Structure formats: structure tokens, C-alpha cells
Image: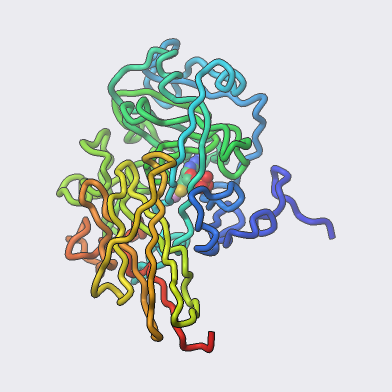
Amino acid sequence: MPRELRPGGEPPLDEEFPNLAVLSKSPENAEVASRSDLDGLLTPAGTHYIRNHYPTPETDAAGWEISLTGLVDGSGETGPDAEGPTVGFEELREDYPTESVVHTMECSGNGRASFEPDAEGHQWTDGAVSTAVWTGTPVRALLEEYGATDEGWVAVVGGDAPEGEEVFCRSLPIGKVREDCVLAYEMNGGPLPPDHGHPVRLLVPGWFGNNSVKWVDRIHVADSMPTGEEWEGYTKYQQLEYRLRFDDDDEPEELDSVETTDTDEQMAAEEPRHAYFFDQLPKSLITAPTDGTSLSADETVEIRGLAWAGETPVERVGLSVDGGETWTDTDLGEPALGRYAWRRFRTEWYPEAGEYRLLARATDAKGRTQPARIADPDPEQTGIAGDAYPWNTQGYGNNAHEPLGVSVRVGLDGV
Ligand SMILES: Nc1nc2c(c(=O)[nH]1)N[C@H]1C(S)=C(S)[C@@H](COP(=O)(O)O)O[C@H]1N2
Ligand SMILES: [Mo]
């Protein structure tokens, strides 16, 4: 029987990416299967997690165009049907400056599997996070060329939605876009692979993966985020998804702007009640030893892992070998790959025989740290409180450290 290829000619997901655990074949959703495959500062492109709402589209770089609409020269129209100048893929690559950024990207659904009761959606465990070098055109250069305003919002639209489906559209404050966002066409020095947005994706350094729109085909500049009936078909992934909700009847209000894109600050404030997922929260993963390992006694063990906190530098990673009773600081590696990449932490451990539960807890330069656990459902708890992450219907943003712990046995199994 001939092997069934994907519509773009790629092999089936599980064959193409042996290091990924497939959550759904179509649309393509897959996470890094083993922590040991994340045990490097960079994740190979073929090991980077994949998160799609629609199947990976078949794209052609040669004919690809991005349209610029809204408050830019040559458009000035404001609605969803606005037209404006187009920039071809070759032009984007050849006529503009090139920038690279190393970014640790986490899906806001990573860690959803730890919610009790279950949260809705794909049950990502801990592998929907990866780090890559992204290279492309700084969006700033394009905005300058087309005379975009200094204030307002940029809505970026993906070209993956099948006819009749809501487009994947994300809005970003223009200040962030000008500062560091990139229209990436390379990943780890190679062409952008189909599943990661070929030929060009937005890359929003430090922010949750849902902001980094793949297969970009339109950039719309406006005073505010698209909302309401006028923009029907464009608002779902900004105004309904990727917002915290605390029970099923809890419909988030569509906002045309927010005061802060610090996700944690929104969660801590009374307003807005349904935080948007922008900047990432502090988090860490022990990558060695791995869960369930048997170690021999009388041996030095290196415990190591990686920690990230979005736009904010990681300042400390504490380690506990007694399930969280006591903590000691680990040695942090240099932030050699820049402010948006995770940092290595490590420490040496001389265990006696026994069973241990290892935990890591990152703290960033703003003093934010990982809570211990996930709270029980409570519509009043909209942010991190009492060392607990808020339970939410879609299981977004979990950065609790206890569910990420690693159990090891030392000197007990004849090793
Ligand atoms: N157009 C489009 N862009 C998208 C998505 C999508 O479904 N469609 N998924 C988003 C989500 S939720 C995440 S976490 C990241 C994942 O990027 P990756 O697949 O390259 O890891 O892409 C984002 N960009
Ligand atoms: Mo995501």
C-alpha cells in the first residue's frame, strides 16, 4: 500500500518527527516526548513542538505575499476588508535588514494535563516548549517603510484557516512589534519548515507561542485590537481563546486595548478579569536525571535543567531534593543566547540511598516565582495566590513546579 503523505507532500507526523509525541495528526499537534530531548540550549527544528489549529497549509514561497492594511501608506482603510500594498516573500527577504533572535517558545496550553478536574483541549504534558534561532525581517523595518503610526495595535493574520473558518489573528501593541518582533523565514539556520509557518511567520520574543502567528498573509495596523461584529471571523483567537476563564459561563469581555501585556500583572489585577496570554511566566524543567531513573549510591549526580521567564531574565533557580521542604540555589549558566532564551541551571548532588522527589523553581528579575501547585476550581481566584496557580477551564499558563517534579531512586535497584 502506498504511504499516505500529508497534503503538502510531507510524511505523516509520527514518521517525520520521531522525537515528538503526537496529540493529533490533523491538525498537526505534537510535543517533545522526552525531557532528555530538551536537554540542550537549542532544540533541533525536527524536535521543536508543533501546535496547529488547522492542518499545515501547502504554501509556495515564490508566490507568497503579505498585505499591509490599516494605518499604513497606501491603505488607510480600517475594516476587515481593507486593502493595501503587498510585499512579496523575495522582497521581504532581499530588500530589508535581517535579524536573528533566540527565543524559548512555550504554548500557553503546556502543562494542561496537570489540571484537576481536566481542562478542555489537547492534554499537553510538559513538552510544548522549545528553543530555536529565528531569523528574518524585523517588523519595524516594514512598518517604517510603510509609514505606520507609533501608537496602536498590529493585527497579524495567518493564512491557514480553511474557507469559512475563523482566521488565526493575533493583536500586538505596536511598541512590542517595533522593539523586537521578526517576520521569520529561517529556523536554526535552515528554511522555515512547513509546520512552523513556511514561508514566513511572526516571531514574538518572550511571549507565549499563541502570539507568533504562522503563515503570515496580512498585517493590519490600527488604533485598537479588532473587536465586535465588524471583525467577525477575526476575533476568536484573540478575544475568546487564550484568555483565562474560570467556569463555562464565564464569557470574556472583548477589549480593544489593555494596560499591560504582562500576563502575570493582568492575572493579579481585578481588571481585566480574563487575562490575555502575552508575556510568558517564569518556569523551569529538570532535564537530567529524568523521571523514574534508578541511580547508584555513592556517586555524584549532576542535576540540571533549563529555566525561562519570557521577557524577564531568570535570576535564580532553587532546587529541592525533598519534595519542596528545603531549597538550595543552583548554579546558573550565562545567558549566552540572549534575554529571550532559557538558561541552564545545574548543581551537584551526593545522595544517600533512598527515594527522592526533585523539584526546581525559577525566580525572575521581577521577583516572580513559580507557585507550587494548581488551585481547586474557584471563580474568585483569577491569579496566582497562596502558592497556587488558578484553575481555569482551558488550562492555560500552568507554571506550577510540583507537577514538573522528577522522582528518582538511589541505591535501591542494584545499580
Ligand atoms: N496561523 C497560525 N499561527 C499559529 C497557530 C495556528 O494554529 N495558526 N498556533 C499558535 C500557537 S497556539 C502556538 S503555541 C505556536 C506554535 O508554534 P510552532 O508550531 O512553531 O511550535 O504557533 C502559533 N501560531
Ligand atoms: Mo499555543
Query: In the image, is residue 162 above or below residue 19?
Result: above
Q: Position of residue 148 (x, y in %)?
A: 37, 16
415 or 400: nearer the eye? 415
**What residue appears at the point 41 percent right and 19 percent down from the top-left corner?**
143
**What residue appears at the point 44 percent right and 81 percent down from the top-left corner?**
298
Query: In the image, is residue 66 above or below residue 36?
Result: above
> Which quadrant holds residue 301?
bottom left
Q: Position of residue 264 (x, y in %)?
A: 24, 49
Q: How many marks?
A: 0
Query: In the image, is residue 53 above or below residue 413?
Result: above
119 or 78: nearer the eye? 119
Q: Position of residue 223 (x, y in %)?
A: 29, 24
Q: Is residue 120 visible?
A: no
Q: Is residue 304 visible?
A: yes
**What residue appears at the point 41 percent right and 56 percent down from the top-left corner?**
306
Q: Position of residue 168 (x, y in %)?
A: 47, 40
Which residue occupies the extreme right position in the image?
Answer: 1
Which residue occupies the extreme left position in the image?
Answer: 270
Query: In the image, is residue 47 above or below residue 415?
Result: above
Is residue 376 found left or right of 16 in the rendered image?
Answer: left
> Which quadrant holds residue 297?
bottom left
Which residue occupies the extreme top position in the image?
Answer: 74
Is residue 297 found left or right of 261 in the rendered image?
Answer: right
**Quadrant occupied by the N terminus:** bottom right
